[in-house]
Image: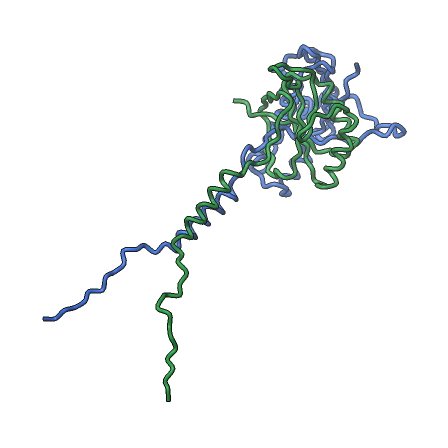
Amino acid sequence: MLLKKRQREGAEINGSSMADIAFLLLIFFLVTTTINVDTGIGMVLPPPLDPEVEPPPIRERNLMNILVNAQGLILMDEQPVGIAEVKDKLIEFIDNPTNNDQLSISPDAAIVSLKTQRETPYNIYIDMLDEVMSAYKDLRDAASRANYGVEYAQLKENSPQQEQIKDMYPKKISIAEPDN
Amino acid sequence: MAHFKKKQAGTKQEVPTSAMPDVVFMLLFFFMVTTVLREVTLKVKLDLTRANNIEKIEEKRLVSYIYMGPERLPGNQLGEDKVQIDDSIVDDIGAIRNIMYDKLLEEPRLIVSLRVDQNSEFGLLTDVQKELQQAGTFRINYSTKRED
């Protein structure tokens, strides 16, 4: 009788690669955890004014004065307007398609000055700023579509195309200090 | 001649690795549980306003926050509008320029994110912005939520 001793095969699963999987997970979590991305309206403040240096003269027609009081009433170049009209008026002022001699000479000369009172609630101020930003966004999108066929946001960051559109419509927004 | 046979230990010379995943998983859980991404405790009430044309700040490590809003007082009451930087309320507005200047030296590409309560007044914000101008931190961001 042939007595063959059967070699028992171990019923184990090779667990050594489990560690690698766990490490991979660990690294994945470490890398991807970015919570709460901050969103907002970006601005660049001007350097502080030197009292001895005269500010450069600005031609009246290139300046759009927007005044907002604490109740949210808006004056654009001395005319009362509703918040819904602000954007269209701004686009007309910046682009000046009809070469009106009351509006900006060229888009890159246009300056939007935003002035509020100290008592103005922050959300009214942000609403106004949002309208200004949205006017510039529309203009940049239109220019970008006309030249490159895509929207401004789809142009590559810091690419020459994006710089060109930026130069065409620079955001010159001045936040004036409240008087009182 | 005597034949010396080297005595070999009967045991295998492998380190058992089966417990390794457990160790690593334990590490994983430890990190997942303990990683509290440094959140400040807000001492002011903050209710952000909403806007449409907003951009994301991708470089999070460049951002430094300034919080503005009515101060939270004990007993669920709200006080005057105050400015909070990091974990403490700054009572002296004039001190902001030094605080922000020190931050700017640490990170020259600093972006200051202003998180302002929607009902606080614009006057305080102008004072803070004037301080930021003095400090030389010109890149700011008005933190808002997306309108929906």
Q: How is the image coloured?
A: by chain
Residue A166, given in percent of the width and then of the height, sits at: 66, 35
Q: Is residue B129 visible?
A: yes
**Residue found 58% across the figure and 41% down from its top:** A156
Residue A75, given in percent of the width and then of the height, sits at: 71, 13
The residue furthest left is A1
Front-most of residues B28 and A86 = B28
Front-most of residues A148 and B20 = B20
Q: How many numbered circles does the render carry?
A: 0
Quick one: quadrant of the N terminus of chain A? bottom left
The chain coloured blue is A
Q: Colour of chain B?
A: green
Quick one: quadrant of the C terminus of chain A? top right
**Residue found 83% across the figure and 29% down from its top:** A49
Give the quadrant of residue B7: bottom left
**Residue found 74% across the figure and 25% down from its top:** B128
A105 relative to A1, above or below: above
The residue furthest right is A52
B1 relative to B26, above or below: below
**Residue found 61% across the figure and 28% down from its top:** B41
Front-most of residues A77 and A116 = A116
Residue A54, given in percent of the width and then of the height, sits at: 87, 28
Give the quadrant of residue B17: bottom left
Residue A70, given in percent of the width and then of the height, sits at: 69, 12
Front-most of residues B8 and B55 = B8
Q: Is residue A89 visible?
A: no
